[in-house]
Image: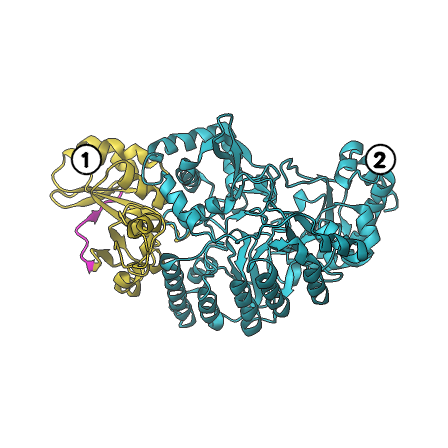
Chain colours: A cyan, B yellow
Amino acid sequence: MYIYDAFDRTLVNERVAEFRDQVTRRLSGELSEEEFKPLRLMNGVYLQLHAYMLRTAIPYGTLSSEQLRMLAHVARKYDRDYGHFTTRQNIQYHWIKLAELPDAMADLASVGMHGMQTSGNCVRNITTDQWAGAAPDEIEDPRIWAELIRQHVTLHPEFSFMPRKFKIAVGTSAHDRAALRIHDLGLQMHRNAAGETGFEVMVGGGLGRTPFLAQTIKPFLDKRDVLSYVEAVLRIYNQFGRRDNIYKARIKILVHELGPEAFAKEVEAEWANIKDGALAIDDAIVGDIAGRFVYPRYEQLSDNPAQFVAARKADRHFDAWVANSVANHKVPGYAIVTLSLKPEGGTPGDATAEQMDAIADLADRYSFSEIRVGHEQNLVLPHVAQRDLPALWRALAPLGLALPNVNSIVDIISCPGLDYCSLANARSIPIAQEISKRFANLDLQRDLGRLHINISGCINACGHHHVGHIGILGVEKNGEEFYQITLGGKADEHAKLGDLIGPAVPYGQVADVVEDIASAYLELRARPDEIFIETLKRTGIEPFRERVYATR
Amino acid sequence: MPLVENGKVVEDRYVRVAADAPIPDGVPVIVPAARFLAEADALVARDGLLGVLWPNNKRIAELKPWLGHLALIALDFPKFRDGRAYSQARLLREQYGFNGTLRATGDVLRDQFGFLVRAGFDSFEVKKPADAAAFAKSVARYSVVYQPGADGRLPALRRRLQSAGAADVSEDA
């Protein structure tokens, strides 16, 4: 976990003071709403359907227990006792009063948290693998690079008014858990033949109404050049990205219109001018940032201790939870535990203040006081000793947090949709809730295996529907909610956009369609361990299309 | 529209000349980009300080051959949210070595001042008088910066290495 020093704390406090001044000027009428809007947006404050919404940054999804307790406090004091974890590894509160926002921000600042750049046409929260620092397959901890970039782009004087928002993700494992290819800029670490590590640079990914996967513009970038290369990409985008049409303003359109080669040429020309300047990072700088991360002091343990193995044998519910929610850790005797925020009939990604406090306590006891937020809208305890898993499970169960449904059909990624969002055309959350009820049976979930559903309530695609194995997009037709269904999307290292299966269906039929698709899969799969996405790849979408539309 | 330079509201010495108006002799003038490019040779030979108003959708590199003759470049913010001129400013200051006056014009509001100064601007046509009065307070808002800019301030990354303990956050400690 990165520990803020006096510089970081000072900047956050100065930001709170600035925002307090801006709110005062807005309330007095000195600032018009039009003038205030970009200022509040750059602090994560949106005006939603019912109230202001505050989005709080959780840099690369890493939280301390102290920070999580503060998030619970903000939920309790300023909101309605809950918060919503997002696909950007952030948290948002949907019921905040404008006049109380500066106080909420001051409370967050007391633990080094803020809403800076969680909205607006600037570089947004840098995301990475929620298993960073714990995953057995990572080359090195991606958070060091995410933190270097976070600092560089925070209140950047040149890139705070770009054509549109800009999302960066960093990955250092062979298996992409950060959805790099759907980012404006993705950085994937590789080791070259000489044993050196560097980054593959991909640009121009993004979903929304014109989805694109990011294209590689540089296969291997020396790590010392990361900041200068990011600067060059942003400079080209800031000058030449389209500003005439909000739907064509993301970098993906610029990359598409110029072509990746021409875009890369512009970037390389600019980069050549700055690469040996003030942005070149040497080992001292990387070492300084890395040194500000505090790592757990692991005990010397062995994998599969006797009491853990015995507990698995003794209790099939515990065993099922371990099989589903517990992953291998790079340190022997430890495990990575995912806490599903997808209860039956619940809102994906919501956690109550009570749950957040309890998770913070459990993190103190079992996970070196660390918690992660994953883009799948679940939480993670990244460093749990395997011998503690039975006790942790018993503590999680009464909180509704020991749900063995991770990566299942009910582990749904969903945007807030029309229940909250002023941009939405259709509801998302009730669709997710209905699906979670239809598939509440654990044996059925297990039989269906890995199957990702993503739901967006409008074309902006905050629920990443294009990359869901089953993607559901809400649209509006003559004042009614309809839903387009896509199949076969993926956001991992084999990223792919889903294919539309046919005409949109009305609200009341979406869960039926998902049931049709699920039962078609069970009949079509070659063997029980051929997961949905593999069956789909083998058969194509035709048999699924037939099943869905045969009776409609 | 008040003009702020060196942290204070000042009289504007420059006269803005339209595309087709006669150019007065002996006084500092700002001419539009198209006219400047069309009449550059005559303009630089003229007696009196010369400035150009450059739009934010034209490559600033086109000005490179003329930088030695220009006393002022005005960059435009047609809307507060349109930040192209920040890149133009940094290119002029940090790569092309432009040392003259760099003026921000258009929709220039209080909450941009800090960014503008860091991008290399030193002259500001401010839209609202109250904002002009708050200029000094506004640019002093942040004592910590995270990235190098045209203002030469040292980013936190480097200051940490210098001060080792990093306890002192007063500017350039």
Q: Are the residues flagged by discs 2 and 1 from a single subunit?
A: no
User: Along the horizontal axis of the image, is B48 left or right of A479?
Assistant: left
Q: Nearer the viewer, residue A508 or A215?
A: A215
Tell me the element at label 2: loop
Q: How far across and how far down the image is residue A434, in percent?
A: 77, 58
Residue A481 visible (yes or no)? no
As drawn, A9 above or below B97? below
Q: Answer whether residue B16 is magenta in the image.
A: yes
**Nearer the observer, disc 2 or disc 1?**
2
Q: Chain of mark 1?
A: B
Question: Which residue is depicted at the point 52% across and 71% down?
Answer: A97
What amino acid is at disc 1? Gly
What amino acid is at disc 2? Ala
Q: How far across and how far down the image is residue A289, in percent?
A: 41, 48
The answer to which quarter of the image holds residue A237 is top left
Q: Nearer the viewer, residue A183 or B30?
A: A183
Residue bearing the label numbered 1: B68
* Region rendered in magenta: B9-19
User: Along the horizontal axis of the image, is A170 left or right of A366?
Assistant: left
Q: CA distance from mark 2 to mark 1?
A: 74 Å
Q: For residue A526, which numbered disc appears in the image?
A: 2
Q: For residue B164, which numbered disc appears in the image?
A: none
